[in-house]
Image: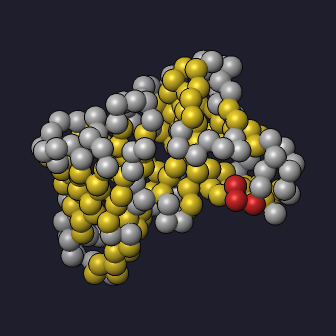
Amino acid sequence: GQQVMQIPQYQHVQEGEDFTTYCNSSTTLSNIQWYKQRPGGHPVFLIQLVKSGEVKKQKRLTFQFGEAKKNSSLHITATQTTDVGTYFCAGRGGYQKVTFGTGTKLQVIP
Amino acid sequence: EAQVTQNPRYLITVTGKKLTVTCSQNMNHEYMSWYRQDPGLGLRQIYYSMNVEVTDKGDVPEGYKVSRKEKRNFPLILESPSPNQTSLYFCASSSGHIYEQYFGPGTRLTVT
């Protein structure tokens, strides 16, 4: 079945440093979504990428979808303490099932 | 307010005692899904539903049942819970399987 891996599993950064999490799928994806889960909270949708090579930005967050539509990344510039949480990618293959990545837990040190 | 609600939020039960976790959404969404979240494993899909009376297995359906008799409700049933089903469960809904999912607040289940 479809597998989606994320690296790193954990990341501690000093406030102001950049952060990147990578998502890799075993199969080609129709689309990929990114979610953020704050500690003790539920996942909240951030963005969806559909096209090969697509790049989208939300303020300090940059999302990329690979040319082969098998990988994606989320980059945060100049992290802030409000960025703390776990970031998940979620990929959809050719069917209705959605496979979430294992998540990257980000800790920002003030 | 658009939302997904789950009940109960916390539940401690014993092995073999049937339980139901309810999920309801007020956004008229067609697609609903159940996930379990375990440390290091991310969110794993248990079951999903494309519409009323249409359900299908996700990646980890063993030991679970679902039903979709009404569009707004998607209960998760554990007929005979076991300790390995101790987890954090999330219900989610979306207007279609290709769209963003809205998650409920979660249900923390402990099976002893």
What residue is rendered at 23% in x and 51% in y?
Answer: A71
What residue is rendered at 23% in x and 36% in y?
Answer: A50
The answer, for residue A59, to whether it is visible in the render is no
- Which quadrant of the figure has residue A54? top left
Above or below residue A34? Residue A5 is: below
Q: How is the image coloured?
A: secondary structure
Above or below residue A6? Residue B8 is: above
The answer, for residue B71, to whether it is visible in the render is yes
Where residue B86 appears, as percent x and y from the top left, is 70, 59
What residue is rendered at 62% in x and 41% in y?
Answer: B61
Is residue B14 or residue A27 the one in the foreground? A27
Q: Is residue B107 left or right of residue A106?
A: right
Where residue A110 appears, as percent x and y from the top left, is 33, 81
Is residue B86 or residue B21 the one in the foreground? B86
Is residue A66 or residue B25 the one in the foreground? A66
Residue at the extreme front of the image, as rendered: A1
Where residue A2 appears, as percent x and y from the top left, is 39, 45
Is residue A39 or residue A48 the one in the foreground? A48
**Where's the C terminus of chain B, which quadrant?**
bottom right
Q: How many marks?
A: 0
Where residue B108 appears, as percent x and y from the top left, is 68, 56
Q: Is residue B57 left or right of residue A79?
A: right
- Which quadrant of the figure has residue B56? top right
What residue is rendered at 34% in x and 78% in y?
Answer: A12
Q: Is residue A74 left or right of residue A4?
A: left
